[in-house]
Amino acid sequence: MTQSVTPWLWAIFTVIAAFMQTLRNAMQRELTAKLGTVGATHVRFLFGFPFVIAFLLGVMLTTGASLPRPGLLFWPWAVLGAFAQVAATALMLAAMGERSFVVTIAYIKTEPIQVAVFGLLFLGDVLTLPMMTAIVVATAGVVIMSTKRGGMIGGIRPTLIGLASGGMFALSAIGFRGGILDLALPNYVMAATFTLTVGIAMQAVVLSVYLALRNPAVMFAILRAWKPSLSAGFAGAVASQFWFLAFALATAASVRTLALIEVLFAQLVARFAFGQRTSAREVLGMLLVVAGVALLLWAY
C-alpha cells in the first residue's frame, strides 16, 4: 500500500494535519465556555461528519474506487480509534480549562512514547534506535515546557488530565492505523478516508444520541452555535483526513512524533490569539522538539 508513493509524503501530510488541528483546538477552546466540555467535544464530530462524507465521495469520483468491504477485525480497530479519540478530546478540553493553551498541548504531546509502545505491542511497528532517540528528545522538549522550579505548572490535576488525554490519543492513533492496515487496499487514500468516515460516523451518532437523551439543552446549544461550530468541524475534518493519510504511510509513532510541531503552532496561536507570552523554558522545550523532529526526518 505504501511502496509506490513518495517517502516524504507522510511528513507533508502530518505537518498539514498538525497546523489544522492547532486551529481546531483554538476554536474548540472558545466553544467550551459556551457548550461545556462534552458539547465542544461533539462539535468536532457532528460538524466534521458532512465534510468527511464529501472527502469520501471525492475520492470515489476522482479515483474510480469503490467502497471497501471490511472484514471482522476492522471493526474492533475502528471502535478503539473512535472512542479513544472521544475520551482524548474531552480530556484535552478539560485540561485547557485549567491551564494555558500551550502548556496543555505540551502535556498531551507526551503521547509519542506511548504510541511507540502500543504500536510495537499491537501492530508490530518496529522503530530504529535513531527514531526512538528522536521520540525521546522531542518528548523531553514538551516535558521541559510543562515544568518550572518546584514541579509541574498548575499542580497535579491538569498534569494528570493532560497525560491521560495523551494516552487516549495514542490508543486512538493505534486503533485507526490498525483499521487502515486491516483493509489492505492498494489505494491508501481510500483506505484512510473510509476508515475516517466510519470512525467519525460512530462518534457523531453515539454522542448525538447521548446528548439528546441526557442533556438535550446542550444539543440545542450546539445547533444554535452552528456558525463557529461549522468552522471548527471543517478544520477538524481536514486535520483528520491528513492524519489518516499519514497513518496509512508511516508508523503511528513516527507520525505522532513529527506532530509535535503542533506545539510550535500552538505557541503562535497562543501569542497572537490569546496574548500569552513565551518563557525561556518554553523556548528551550521548543528547540528540543525541533531537534527531535529533525532527527526523526533524518532517520527516515
Image (tube, helix red, strand yellow):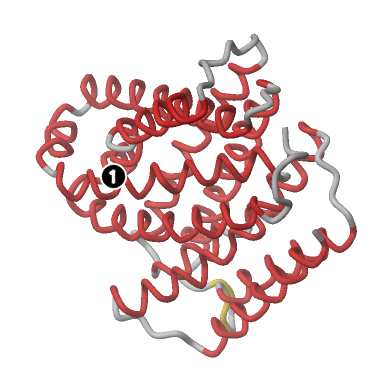
Query: How far from the left and from the top, in percent, is residue 20?
Result: 42, 56
Question: For the view shown, which residue lies furthest in the left direction?
Answer: 224
Residue 208 or residue 63, whichever sits in front: 63
Residue farthest to the bottom, as pictured: 280
Mark 1 burial class by Cα count in 10 Å: few <14, some 14-19, many 20+ = many
Locate the N terminus by quadrant.
top right
Quick one: SS at disc 1? helix
Query: On the rendered structure, is 285 left or right of 263?
Result: right
Instruction: Point out the residue furthest to the right here.
Output: 129
Measured along the vertical axis of the image, is residue 70 above or below residue 81?
A: above
11 and 32: which is toward the camera: 11
| Residue depicted at 20% across the width and 45% down the height | 35
269 horizontally vs 224: left or right:
right
Compared with residue 72, is residue 115 higher up or lower down, i.e. above or below?
A: below
Residue to which mark 1 is pinned: 40
Residue 64, x across and y down, in percent: 51, 22
Q: Residue at x 45, y 85 (%)?
A: 278
Quarter of the picture containing the C terminus is bottom right
Q: How many marks?
A: 1
Residue at the (57%, 37%) spot, across then down? 172
- Residue at screen point 72% across, 71% down: 294
Say which amino acid is labelled 1: Ala
> Residue 269 lies in what quarter of the image?
bottom left
Residue 132 location (% of width, % of height): 82, 59
